[in-house]
Image (spheres, rainbow, N blue to C red):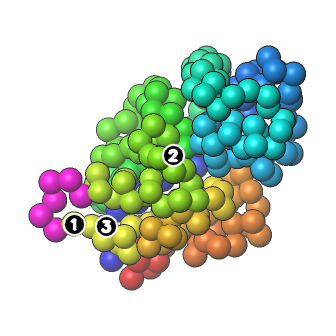
Amino acid sequence: MLKAVIFDFDGVITDSEILHFRAFNSVLGEHGIELTTKEYYKSYLGFSDVDCFKLLIQEGRLDVREDEIGGLVRRKGRFYEELSRNEGRLIEGVRDFLDMLAGHDIPMAICSGALLPEIETILEGAGLRGHFTAIVSAEHVTKGKPDPEGFLLALDRLNAGRSKPILSKECAAIEDANWGLQAATKAGMHTVGVTNSYDAETLAPAEKIVDSLKELSLADLQALCR
């Protein structure tokens, strides 16, 4: 039985992946690096900011020490905040879908590799912060997706104060990338892939794939968790 829905943020709720890409390139450009859109979506999208910079260092593309990553993340966050304030927007169909779940008293959470201020800036601006009982962001975990830590923490927070806890198998996770689908599956949750960032073939591990949340019904989610 469906008891909760946990969402990724970038690429599921807000059309912000391109803003993250531009913010990363603003920082990397100061170090003589520029990612192409194709390589960002293929190799780096879905990672937390910390893990993305770590990967670039490990690949030998970014010549900085790992103890400098915190400063890079903060600088990238400032670029992103400015972009999201001016250009951030919800993906079409998201508001109606969230309202539908809220109308049926389905608890909702976010599990994202984005930073908490980035998430809350957009949710508060859209008047949707109150829809989410819990938000797990990059600052709250030691391991990003595809590790299940974030999804399990989101479930723990949804269960806070409940006399009868929600089980992993009673949760549907909605993701736009394979890393997130892997993490949710490892957490024991049912999965929906939305083709906002990748095509259906790439999202094949998902139990259900849709092109938009406008195509997803409460009955679909209930069927996954039945």
Q: Would residue 97 appear left or right of 91 to someone viewing this image?
A: left
Mark 3 / mark 1, whichever is N-terminal: 3
Tag 2: amino acid: Ser
To which residue does mark 1 refer? 165
The residue that label 2 is drawn on is 112
Q: Amino acid at mark 3?
A: Lys
Q: Earlier in the sequence, mark 2 or mark 3?
A: 3
> Residue 209's x, y, as percent?
63, 68
Q: Secondary structure at mark 1?
A: loop
Number of on-image labels? 3
Distance (Cα) linking label 1 and label 2:
22 Å
For this rendering, which residue is in front, 98 or 203? 203
Main SS of the magenta segment?
loop
Q: Which mark is residue 3?
A: 3
Which residue does the image show at 79% across and 17% down from the upper left?
Answer: 30
Please state the extent of the stretch shown in magenta in the rendering.
159-164
Mark 3 packing: few (<14 Cα in 10 Å), some, or many (20+)?
A: some
Q: CA distance from mark 3 to mark 1?
A: 10 Å
